[in-house]
Image: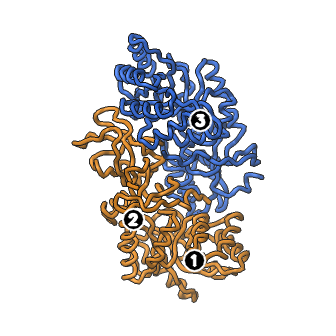
Chain colours: A orange, B blue
Amino acid sequence: MHISELDTPVVIIDLDRLEANIARLQSYLDAHQILNRPHIKTHKIPQIAQMQLQAGATGITCQKLGEAEVMAQAGTKDIFIPYNLMGDKKLERLAILMKMAQISVTADSEYTARGLARAAQQASNELTVLVEFDTGSGRCGVQNPQQAADLACVIADMPSLKFGGLMTYPANQNTALFIQETKTLLEKRGIPVERVSLGGTPKMWEAHTHTGVTEYRAGTYVYGDRATLKAGAMTVNQCAMHIVSTVISRPNAERGILDAGSKTLSSDLLGLTGHGLILEYPEAQIHQLSEEHGHVDFSGCINRPQIGERVTIIPNHCCVVSNLFNQMVGVRGDQVEVVWDVAARGLLT
Amino acid sequence: MHISELDTPVVIIDLDRLEANIARLQSYLDAHQILNRPHIKTHKIPQIAQMQLQAGATGITCQKLGEAEVMAQAGTKDIFIPYNLMGDKKLERLAILMKMAQISVTADSEYTARGLARAAQQASNELTVLVEFDTGSGRCGVQNPQQAADLACVIADMPSLKFGGLMTYPANQNTALFIQETKTLLEKRGIPVERVSLGGTPKMWEAHTHTGVTEYRAGTYVYGDRATLKAGAMTVNQCAMHIVSTVISRPNAERGILDAGSKTLSSDLLGLTGHGLILEYPEAQIHQLSEEHGHVDFSGCINRPQIGERVTIIPNHCCVVSNLFNQMVGVRGDQVEVVWDVAARGLLT
């Protein structure tokens, strides 16, 4: 099937680019002897996880228990969930998941660690827990090396838990020092730091500059998006995800309306201006979204589209687009090669 | 089941409030002899559409063909799709849909109208087409009464199409004049304007002030959200949709992290500051979202939550939350009464 036969809006994945993106990061991390543990939140598709593993990834990263369940059921054997899992329901599911795959998780509090210990006891198995630390994102994570070392000791002392190392997102200029100071504190207590897991696509090519890193988690690199372009980590011609949309209205000379709104592109701005890059009209601005309409200002374009014309969009943030579509269409050139269910889409717990 | 047994994040719908919201708008529109045609994009649940119809709605509004297909399969007999439907695939589906229910649609261009005429011919049935006009949203719609009248004539002249009237969103202070001028132009040509369809929850209580309105489309009114509160159209105690979320981290004295991020709340701001109202901590600011984390500043709160505590959130925009969840949990007081599949979720074409 030719891509022009697909109804819009539709997400197409350029398979040549996808394969090249997977190979490129793997080669880089291999060259620096850093393990690759890609984050599947970007694609949520077991078949793409399989491609990443076959290319050399050591395992995968999932942000939700539900994503990990889908991936384990699809055969993935090594899954890292860098999230504070808590509550009886999730801990029961974690105990079951531990029987399906080798699971590691994170904690940034004793509260989280205690729950994880209960799950591990229920699974009659040892659970590897890394300490999450924060050197800039202002999200979860212990705030200084002393807290990291103290929590590592708490974890190491708990029955059924193994202290697995350190994790942060994203890595930045403060990360290496934090790691070194924590390691020094833990060496005095005789506790080794086996894994140091950093992540983030925008600065993935700097992974080797963070002294102490042992594994890297990138997600967006498989597809690329406008935020990745802005970060300079990928080029337009490497972007593998495109949204094909139809111009459904041209109310006046400047304005065009697309059938891709916030239900297609999401409202994520990530510091960018506008809601996507239209490849055929790069000067156009997708300046506003309603759920089913994208409002485009074509005034900067010499040529402007007709009603019914199709356009090709690089979204601001590919991960959230994956969460909005039930299926992705893999294409080779202009031919459809595969349709994937986004099997781990919409899993909120 | 008590709501405390639900895993988080979860969307709960207060059924008492939902029923009251449905009844309140119906009473108002009945009192003003305006037909009620609620927009189901807000809930995407056939059972709630059924409640709206049983309360007196004349039919429903869907924004996507796929939504209309779900609702028609569930037995809804009168469906309005105020969207420029185009392209062979959609027009074929429209022809089939016309055999399942009484369908009306909109057009704002001759291009759209021509496609609709082909679908109607394929269905061997007459299709009612309203002209969409724009008096302020800057989205789709003809720009002035002359264009509206000209397009109405084009539609009226096409085989298999019936000119059905006028549609806009949202109604504003310019709407009544536009309607009147278009009607005057069309009277001269002997073309009646049977339906005038306006919409929008924020100003729903002004529906009767737009001279000429015959039907009203509101969606958000069933649940309410922070944008509706800001508009003054509903009160906090009328809001029927809440997201229950767990505090999964308290990295420092001020900051808390929720398990509700942009995959739960969406990134829609709608001109608001912050990403939701936490009922237990109304002074708190959900100042940033990543996909699976809500970043909360509790510095304005005297009491602050513990890790593991649950909070209750009114989202900025309830419609997009519906699109992110596969199920909604209907509750009566603190007891779960029903779990609904969001059957028309994620239908992009």
Residue that label 2 marks: A15
Task: Decide which of tag 2 and tag 1 comes sooner along the chain.
Answer: 2
Crowding around mark 2 (Cα neighbors within 10 Å: few <14, some 14 to 19, many 20+) is: many
- Residue A146, given in percent of the width and then of the height, sits at 54, 76
- A181 versus B238 height, above or below: below
Q: Nearer the viewer, residue B22 or A85?
A: B22
Q: Chain of mark 3?
A: B
- Residue A45, given in percent of the width and then of the height, sits at 51, 64
Give the Cα distance between marks 3 and 2: 39 Å
Disc number placed over residue B305 in the picture, else none:
none
Element marked by disc 1: loop
State yes or no: discs 3 and 1 in contact (Cβ < 8 Å).
no
Q: Say whether residue A130 is visible.
A: no
Residue that label 1 marks: A77
Look at 42% across and 64% down and name the residue there.
A220
Q: Is residue A160 left or right of residue A189?
A: right
Discs 2 and 1 lie in a common subunit: yes
Discs 3 and 2 lie in a common subunit: no
Residue that label 3 marks: B100
